[in-house]
Image (tube, grey):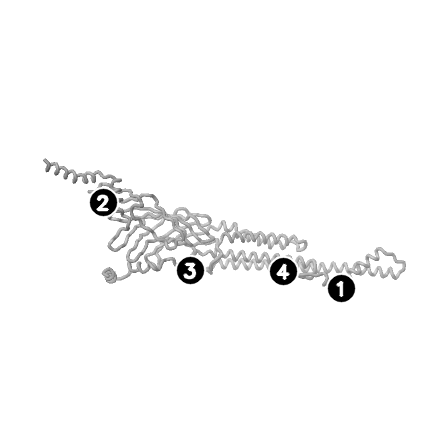
């Protein structure tokens, strides 16, 4: 009787796992897999983990033209196989389960040229199928430097910015990524910059390195309206001011106003565009030329206004040290004599003749003074026309030079190398060394 109870007990003990296994649902199976604590990477014979990136979704969030930095959001969907996470039909009939993302191993990507990276899982769960295939998605918030983009012809700029997303290499182990053939580009225009296209490019030097080539272009409308067009209109207004008379000072007031207005646009340009580098934007040179042109025009106008009042232009004038010219002294003496004649009465004829002679000399000096003033005005007008022709000629030559410079590639930036050369040895070992060397190394 006791033997029979023991046999029944043993039969019950061995039959319980079978019953539990047959009735194990998705959550039960997930708990069994979590209990294995598979936090380490899958260890294959060659110490290589192959991860297939099924799709990538790219979006440009912002572009800082001042610092030449691009912020983007990349969603990466990937799959890999971990046989130790799989199960067979005897364990459960479930085809797939959901596991917490922090309970199993997930690949970490390497971004060689990133300034700042934030990684977040797309969901808190990952899907694991029966054969151990893991389906996982992550979101990368990346900030990279785009110094390879040439801003020389800004705002008519087209360039490419690189976002290097790869696996890691450590000694004989590596995470090998298979990139998709095409990438989905979400969104197009961010401010004045537009994301035209995103492609995967194989590096020519480092065969195991790929990067996302983001093609960008600038919408020139905003820069033309806020920077280029106002500068052209101010330069045109400066030429029109030569139609105003030199006398009076109205022209000088207008030219000073133009210089102050142009200084405001210089401040806007300095806050908007990067000024360093070998290929500085041509707009900096354009604004520098315009400012120098405006200041020279203002100075010439002030000088011409001074010449209309006196044929001599003195930077400093001291009344005690300067003696009046003979013509001015004679004119003042005649004015004094005419005043005396006007208030005195003479009875003798010689004195009347002398007084009449002084009046004639006074009138002749007034005519001479008017002739001198007319000559000064004519001379200043001639100089004014020469200045107008000079500035007009300079502006025309400048426009021709700008057109020629913008049509030719005078400035080209060198492509920046951002790969870590320490990993090149291991990548070369994995793809390029002969088999006997590999065998010898493994034996060693």
- The residue that disc 2 covers is 87
Q: Does the CB distance between marks 1 and 2 fall below 8 Å?
A: no
- The local crowd at label 1, few if under 14, some if 14 to 19, many if 20 or more residues have their Cα within 10 Å, is few
Under circle 1, the secondary element is helix
Q: Which numbered marker is on residue 386?
A: 4
Disc 1/disc 3 C-alpha distance (Å) = 72 Å
Q: Nearer the viewer, residue 175 or 6?
A: 6
- The residue that disc 3 covers is 414
Q: Earlier in the sequence, mark 4 or mark 3?
A: 4
Q: Earlier in the sequence, mark 4 or mark 1?
A: 1
- The residue that disc 1 covers is 326
Mark in front: 4 vs 1: 1
Under circle 4, the secondary element is helix
Residue 303 placement: quadrant: bottom right
Q: Earlier in the sequence, mark 1 or mark 3?
A: 1
Disc 4/disc 1 C-alpha distance (Å) = 32 Å
Mark in front: 4 vs 3: 3
Disc 4/disc 3 C-alpha distance (Å) = 46 Å
């Amino acid at each position: 009787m006791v033997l029979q109870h023991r046999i029944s007990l043993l039969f019950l003990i061995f039959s319980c796992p079978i019953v539990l296994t047959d009735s194990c649902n998705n959550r039960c199976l997930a708990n069994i897999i979590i209990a294995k604590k598979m936090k380490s990477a899958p260890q294959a014979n060659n110490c290589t983990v192959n991860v297939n990136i099924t799709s990538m979704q790219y979006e440009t969030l912002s572009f800082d033209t001042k610092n030449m930095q691009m912020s983007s959001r990349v969603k990466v969907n990937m799959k890999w196989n971990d046989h130790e996470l799989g199960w067979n039909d005897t364990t459960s009939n479930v085809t797939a389960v959901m596991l917490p993302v922090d309970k199993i191993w997930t690949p970490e990507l390497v971004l060689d040229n990133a300034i700042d990276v934030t990684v977040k899982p797309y969901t808190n769960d990952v899907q694991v199928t029966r054969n151990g295939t893991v389906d996982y998605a992550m979101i990368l918030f990346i900030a990279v430097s785009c110094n390879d983009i040439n801003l020389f012809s800004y705002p008519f700029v087209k360039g490419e910015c690189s976002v290097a997303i790869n696996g890691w290499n450590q000694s004989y182990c590596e995470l090998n990524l298979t990139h998709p053939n095409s990438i989905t580009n979400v969104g197009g225009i961010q401010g004045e910059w537009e994301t035209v296209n995103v492609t995967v490019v194989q590096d020519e030097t480092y065969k195991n390195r790929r990067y996302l080539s983001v093609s960008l272009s600038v919408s020139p409308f905003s820069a033309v309206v806020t920077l280029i067009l106002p500068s052209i209109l101010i330069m045109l207004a400066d030429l029109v001011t030569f139609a105003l008379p030199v006398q009076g000072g109205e022209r000088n007031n207008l030219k000073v106003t133009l210089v102050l207005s142009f200084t405001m646009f210089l401040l806007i340009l300095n806050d908007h565009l990067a000024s360093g580098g070998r290929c500085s934007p041509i707009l900096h040179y354009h604004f520098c030329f315009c400012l120098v042109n405006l200041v020279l025009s203002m100075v010439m106008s002030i000088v011409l206004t001074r010449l209309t009042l006196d044929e001599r232009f003195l930077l400093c004038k001291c009344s005690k040290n300067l003696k009046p010219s003979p013509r001015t002294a004679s004119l003042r003496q005649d004015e004094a004599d005419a005043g005396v004649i006007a208030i005195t009465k003479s009875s003798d004829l010689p004195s009347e003749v002398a007084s009449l002679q002084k009046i004639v000399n006074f009138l002749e000096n007034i005519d001479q003074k008017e002739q001198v003033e007319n000559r000064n005005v004519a001379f200043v007008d001639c100089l004014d026309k020469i200045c107008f022709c000079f500035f007009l000629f300079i502006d025309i030559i400048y426009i021709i030079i700008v057109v020629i410079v913008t049509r030719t590639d005078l400035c080209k930036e060198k492509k920046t190398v951002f790969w870590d050369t320490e990993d090149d040895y291991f990548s070369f070992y994995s793809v390029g060394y002969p088999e006997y060397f590999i065998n010898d190394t493994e034996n060693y």
